[in-house]
């Protein structure tokens, strides 16, 4: 018989169910021939012969179930290991290949110097999910940055009130600040002396706004603004109306 037919017969034997094997052996006990059994069950005569032979020798045709065990390599198989197989087992153990880092040699003097120059940082051994655990943190109060907007007028012989702004300076806020703080501060200075005071400011957008210009025309004698792009020594001043 050709080899391809034998392979086909073996495959058909393993594809038959336990019920079909039992029916085949039962018809054999009834005295039927292999041809009749093959025609009745729809299998080849060689498959019928294999089933009968296995029943007579092993008293059963059920396939042996292999227990599910962990991966284990015998000493004989280890001798013929492939590099890909080794890498696969190492990856299963959560091991990865990485390039080694070059570490300079440090003697005792170097170590003492490093301790003297270190920035006071502390290290802790922890797992990835324990990075922000309370046992792995150093309690501290840290300033996270930010800024505070303030306004103040300064005179050569004193300083005016310090006004803390809730937000960035706008034209409305600038006019309100001058009305509530600058004029009152100027009136207090006028009561003490008769010096003529000058208001100096830069060319910020709230200073140049139309609302601020209209208010200054009523309260302050108008002059041009100081340009920040020019030299710091060149000032354009605004005279203040004294009461």
Image: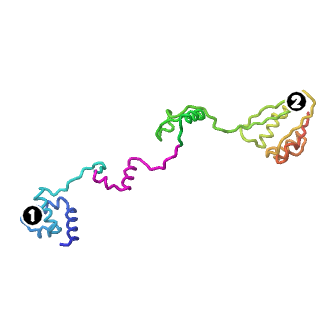
Quarter of the rendering occupied by the C terminus:
top right
Rendered image: mark on residue 28: 1
Q: Residue furthest bottom?
A: 2
Report, in whole angstroms, how far the alpha carbon at label 2 lies from the one at label 1.
129 Å
Q: Nearer the viewer, residue 78 or 225?
A: 78
Quarter of the rendering occupied by the N terminus:
bottom left
**Residue wearing tag 2:** 189
Q: Is 61 part of what is drawn in magenta?
A: no
Q: How is the image coloured?
A: rainbow
Vertical side of 129 occupied by 44: above or below = below
Vertical side of 136 occupied by 207: above or below = below
Q: Residue furthest top?
A: 192
Q: Is residue 178 left or right of residue 137?
A: right
User: Residue at horizontal 86%, vertical 40%?
Assistant: 200
Residue range (magenta): 75-103
Q: Quadrant of residue 111?
A: top right
Q: Quadrant of residue 16?
A: bottom left
Q: Quadrant of residue 144?
A: top right
């Amino acid at each position: 018989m050709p080899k391809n037919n034998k392979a086909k017969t073996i495959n058909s034997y393993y594809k038959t169910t336990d019920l079909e094997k039992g029916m085949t052996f039962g018809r054999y006990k009834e005295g039927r021939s292999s041809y009749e059994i093959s025609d009745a069950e729809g299998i080849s005569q060689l498959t019928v012969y294999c089933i009968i032979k296995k029943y007579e020798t092993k008293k059963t045709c059920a396939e042996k179930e292999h227990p599910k065990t962990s991966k284990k390599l015998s000493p004989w198989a280890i001798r013929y290991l492939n590099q890909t197989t080794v890498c696969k087992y190492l990856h299963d153990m959560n091991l990865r290949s990485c390039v080694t880092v070059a570490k300079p040699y440090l003697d005792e003097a170097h170590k003492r110097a490093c301790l003297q120059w270190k920035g006071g940082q502390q290290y802790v051994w922890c797992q990835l999910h324990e990075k922000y655990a309370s046992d792995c943190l150093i309690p501290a109060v840290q300033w996270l940055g930010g800024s505070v907007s303030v306004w103040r007028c300064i005179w050569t012989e004193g300083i005016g009130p310090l006004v803390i702004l809730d937000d960035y300076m706008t034209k409305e806020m600038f006019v309100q600040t001058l009305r509530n703080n600058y004029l009152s501060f100027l009136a207090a200075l006028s009561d003490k002396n008769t010096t003529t005071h000058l208001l100096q400011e830069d060319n910020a957008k709230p200073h140049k706004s139309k609302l601020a210009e209209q208010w200054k025309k009523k309260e302050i004698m108008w002059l041009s603004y100081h340009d920040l792009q020019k030299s710091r020594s060149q000032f354009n001043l605004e005279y203040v109306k004294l009461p």
